[in-house]
Amino acid sequence: MIKVSRQFCARKLAETALAAALALSAGITGAAAQTAPPAGNLEPEQAFTHKLPAPSPHWVFMRGGWENSGTRIWDGDSGKMLGLVQTTRWSDMALDPAYKAIYVAETIWTKINRGTRQDYVAVYDPMTLNLLAEIPLPGRLIIGAMNNNFVISDDGKTGFVYNFSPASSVNVVDLEKRRLARVVELPGCASLVPVAGIGFSALCSDGTLATVSLAGKAPVITHSAAFFKAAEDPVFDSFVHDRSKGEIVLMSYTGLIRTAKLGATPTIGDAWSIQAAAGLRPGDTKPLDINWMPGGRQLTALHEKTGTLYVLMHRGEYWTQKEDGEEIWVVNMATRKVVKRVPIKNRAGNIAVSQDDKPLIFLTGGEEEGEAVVLDALTFEEKHKLKRAGSGVINTLGAR
């Protein structure tokens, strides 16, 4: 019998393990040497920015909704997402009328929800979505996703940002020089619209339309005669702007439609009932009186060339103006007739229409949160359902 000491065994085991480790290491090194390309053939990393294709009138900008940040850009023809603009909950977005820039008016704090407050307009490149500049503001209304809080002049040179601190005012922004031009105090008024060659107008709580002329050193503010009573039958603040005609189309809570021709002295048209235009009795303010009523956050859309108004309607009583639409009512503004009523599969709270000869309708909000629907505006055929598109307000590009 051969006797072997414990020390000898331990030493031999250690030597065997070391040899195996060295052999494994040599094998790995050899394999790496065979597969790794020569150092001279390595391609250096290069940063690049993807560019969007040429814009189409069927592009649509959809806000993510109350809890979801970002505005997604979708192609209504393909149903594909093209990009995303950074818009937080506390921001409002506006598009240059010629799509030369994307603007976002926003508020942030150095410690997320506290600290030093910063208000500004962010300027983005419309093709790369790169941040180009930030224009400081003295303040702005801290609420987001309303199309009439931040509007751009027809020539794209001036932005108007609504503010409330604590009285109503408007920050007039020089977008060419990228600086604040002036602040206009405008008590009791909100919901802005640019007025070509003049300045801007706003709806006021006393039932008038205020017009602010910026031609002189000091702004000149005038008011139209009162045409609605805010305590009885208010008008929706989400009116639509027809840039081609220089007018806005207003809808009241009971369904009265008016147009206002913008200018130094605006002309307010007479009111007519959308329900009567459909052959039904007009809406009224009586409690528990069920009728077809307008409702939603962005409840009207206008195809400027044909003068066709699309309205989200639902069955309800007065003060149900926030209810999402069950149907789209198609209104011929020239004849003042509802020419078609289109049921919606899933209710919608926001509607927009493209401005080309083959328009598309875009719907968001409603029962399916985050899902958008694209319809042919002539046949109302469903073209696409866009998952996780957003449930907020919608922006489209102007006619091209």
Image: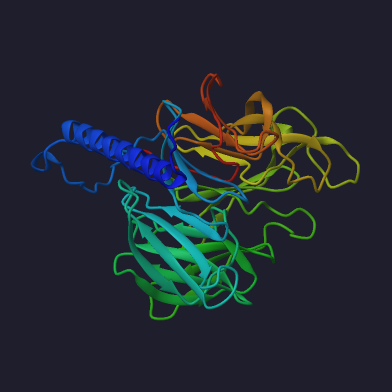
Q: Quadrant of residue 397?
A: top left
Kindly tell me whether residue 155 is visible in this rendering.
Answer: yes
Left or right: residue 98 compared with residue 309: left
Q: Can you say which quadrant of the picture contains the C terminus?
A: top left
Q: Where does the image place residue 176, in percent across and percent down from the top left? A: 29, 65
Q: Along the line of sight, which residue is nearer the eye, 67 or 10?
A: 10
Kindly give the residue lying farthest to the right in the view shown: 288
Q: Position of residue 350 (x, y in %)?
A: 61, 40
Q: Is residue 353 above or below residue 192?
A: above
Query: Residue shown at 67%/57% (left/top)?
Result: 227
Q: Nearer the viewer, residue 64 or 293?
A: 64
Q: Is 122 above or below relative to 101? A: below
Asked whether, in this view, residue 352 is left or right of residue 286, the answer is left
Q: Residue at x 52, y 67 (%)?
A: 107
**Front-lying residue, 189 or 396:** 396
Image position, residue 268 (x, y; %): 59, 54
Q: Is residue 307 left or right of residue 159?
A: right
User: Quadrant of the rendered structure where residue 133 is?
Assistant: bottom left
Tally the marks: 0
> Which residue lies at the image location 52% right of the left edge and 74% below the top edge?
139
Q: In the rendered view, how is the structure colored?
A: rainbow
Q: Nearer the viewer, residue 259 or 60?
A: 60
